[in-house]
Amino acid sequence: MSVYKVPVNREMLIWAREDAGYEIEDLPKYLKSVNKWESGEDKPTWNELRKLANKYKRPSVFFLRSHPPEEDEEEFKDYRTTHPFDFDESPELKLEIRKAKYRRDSFINIQKEMGLVIPSFSRYKFESKDYLAFARKMRDIIGVDIETQKSWIFRLKGNRDPLHSRFLDEWKERVSELGVLIFETEKVEKTEISGLTLYKSEYPIILLNGSDNQNRRIFTLFHELTHLMLGESAICDLDKRNSKEAFCNKVAGEFLVPREYLEQESIVEKNTTKEWTNYQLARLSNFYGVSKQTILLRILTLNKITKKSFGIQFKQLKKDAEEQEKKKKELQKTQKQSGAMAPVDKKIKYEGKPYSRLVLSAYDHKIISPVNFSRYMDLPVTDVEKLAEKIF
């Protein structure tokens, strides 16, 4: 008996592969016949098509469409390279961008169904080459004073949290109130991006690299918010050196650790040696909820450390951070063996509380069905109570 072959549209096969970021030679051996399917020489079976659909993260019936979907192409400014509009995303990053766009569309559609007002972010656009003025404007817009920021220091079993988890949660909530959707990537390498922005006049997106630690994500959040206030979509690596990234880094540093407050700290005022202990840096980093590297950079702007000492100490802090990352990875391997992050916790981390709250609220008010709840959250309806407990 002959095996049934699915009459797929080869144009759709080619489009989906390219959209997913794959070359034919990048595909696994179990999809070795893709070139024949794309040329029309052969057709896949349903089993083969399901495997292909899983790889491209598309439903199987997608390949039966008559033509590819019309999607808005984002004109990213890639500040990781010298070619600002030319970058190659990995398949993982392409998927995360697609998911972020889908969540935004879903978020807006639900808001409209609920009769909620959709705010305009364009009112926050600000053009200034003065990073000090830009940081002041940002703080005015967000409306959080230094004393409130300092009150967020989070204690875990009597010890301060060096990664400042609570600060990250608080800042994400405050930035979200401006009408910004904040998501995190799940499987994008840290070496590819620190974050990116998709500028829209309504509900622009900030996508943070979920593989980075909390301190780095805090800094990235305000680096990316600077791009949004400049009215641009951008893909960024905080470690790359160019004028725009340097400006966004300066704004983020000044916003998180304002010069006028840092220089008045007793630890800073009393230090006349231009040498800094790890203890001093840790105390200041806990005051403001940032990394010790960020504090050291801010101290450099005050001319309270020599460039030579800064270079040596910054290098050591970076080495220490890498050691912590190794320990974190080892711990994650152990956790995977004993049980990975709970599905509800994953959704809150990667999709954000505002998105999760809106979907849950729409479900509670019977605006969306149980089927749509599961589709929007990728969670079974049985997890509704768990989700509510976590986000409210």
Image (cartoon, rainbow, N blue to C red):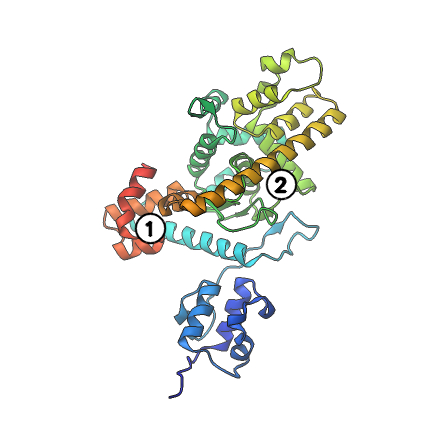
Q: Residues within 10 Å of mark 2 (few under 14, many from 20)?
A: many
Using residue 122 as the reference point, say whether residue 371 is left or right of it: left
**Residue 294 shows up from this direction:** yes
- As drawn, 80 above or below 39: above
- Quarter placement of the C terminus: top left
Splitting the image into 4 quarters, where does residue 372 fall?
bottom left
Marking on residue 204: none
Marking on residue 110: 1
Number of numbered labels in the structure image: 2
Marking on residue 238: 2
Lower position in the chain sequence, tag 1 or tag 2? 1
Residue 24 percent across, percent down from the top left: 58, 70
Residue 9 percent across, percent down from the top left: 46, 77
The residue located at (54%, 51%) in the rendering is 188
- As drawn, 185 above or below 252: below
Does dot 1 land on a helix, a strand or a loop?
Answer: helix
Q: Nearer the viewer, residue 100 or 334?
A: 334
Query: Viewer-nearest of labels 1 and 2?
Result: 2
Which amino acid type is shown beneath numbered disc 1?
Ile
Q: Nearer the viewer, residue 79 or 385?
A: 385
Residue 317 percent across, percent down from the top left: 64, 31
Does dot 2 land on a helix, a strand or a loop?
Answer: loop
Using residue 185 as the reference point, say whether residue 105 is left or right of it: left
The residue located at (69%, 25%) in the rendering is 300
The residue located at (29%, 41%) in the rendering is 388
Which amino acid type is shown beneath numbered disc 2?
Leu
Mark 1–mark 2 Cα distance, whole angstroms, equals 34 Å
